[in-house]
Amino acid sequence: MEKADFMRRAIELSAASNKAEGDGPFGAVIVKDGKITGEGRNRVGSTLDPSAHGEIDAIRDACRNLGTSDLSGCELYTSCEPCAMCAAAIWWAGIERVYFAASAVDSRQAGLGSGTLSEDIARPIEERSAPGEKMPGDEAIDVLKRWVG
């Protein structure tokens, strides 16, 4: 298979999303050594899970299929440029390259997307849309230190 074939599959998955259940038109595939190892599509509405984006669904599928959370050596093909949450998951998984068909601008112009998310997380945590507050954390810090060794 070629790059165009992988992208075509990601777009097919995006078209298969269930609009009636509130799923968005986003699909993705993970490729390793020229073979699809994971597929996903947006399932936010049907699973009532706001993290169930197409890219994350594909990452979860690839990790199960490969028996690892380390997707080094993998590439991701997605129907639309990843949002900030998906970009973070891609980074944590170790995926080495991302190909996308529609840009974030294309998505926003079509009436989809989260254009303010990147701006929101760039603010100090106490000024975000869901403000955070630091609480006493000595016990939590001790757990972190014990974990590291």
Image (cartoon, grey):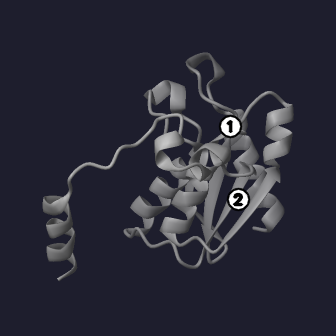
Classify mark 2: residues with Cα within 10 Å, few (<14), some (14-19) or many (20+): many
- Report the front residue among 124 and 11: 124
Q: Which residue is mark 2?
A: 77
Amino acid bearing label 1? Ser
User: Quick check: 133 above or below 91?
Assistant: above
User: Quick check: 46 above or below 64?
Assistant: above
The mark found on residue 80 in the picture is: none
Can the viewer see residue 51 in this picture?
Answer: yes
Residue mark closest to the camera, 2 vs 1: 1
Q: Which residue is mark 1?
A: 114
Locate residue 12, reporting x and y percent.
73, 42
- Distance from label 2 to label 1 (Cα)? 20 Å
- Report the front residue among 137 and 103: 137
Side (left or right) of 149 relative to 84 = left
Mark with earlier residue (2, 1) = 2
Give the position of the C terminus as an image quadrant. Answer: bottom left
Q: For the view shown, which residue lies furthest in the top direction?
A: 20
Dot 2 lies on which element?
strand
Amino acid bearing label 2? Tyr
Picture residue at 45% right of the left edge, 54% below the top: 60
Picture residue at 14% right of the left edge, 68% below the top: 142
Locate residue 62, reporting x and y percent.
49, 61
Give the position of the N terminus as an image quadrant. Answer: bottom right
Cβ–Cβ under 8 Å for marks 2 and 1: no
Picture residue at 44% right of the left edge, 29% below the top: 47
Locate residue 107, reporting x and y percent.
80, 38
Dot 1 lies on which element?
loop
Q: For the view shown, which residue lies furthest in the bottom direction?
A: 149
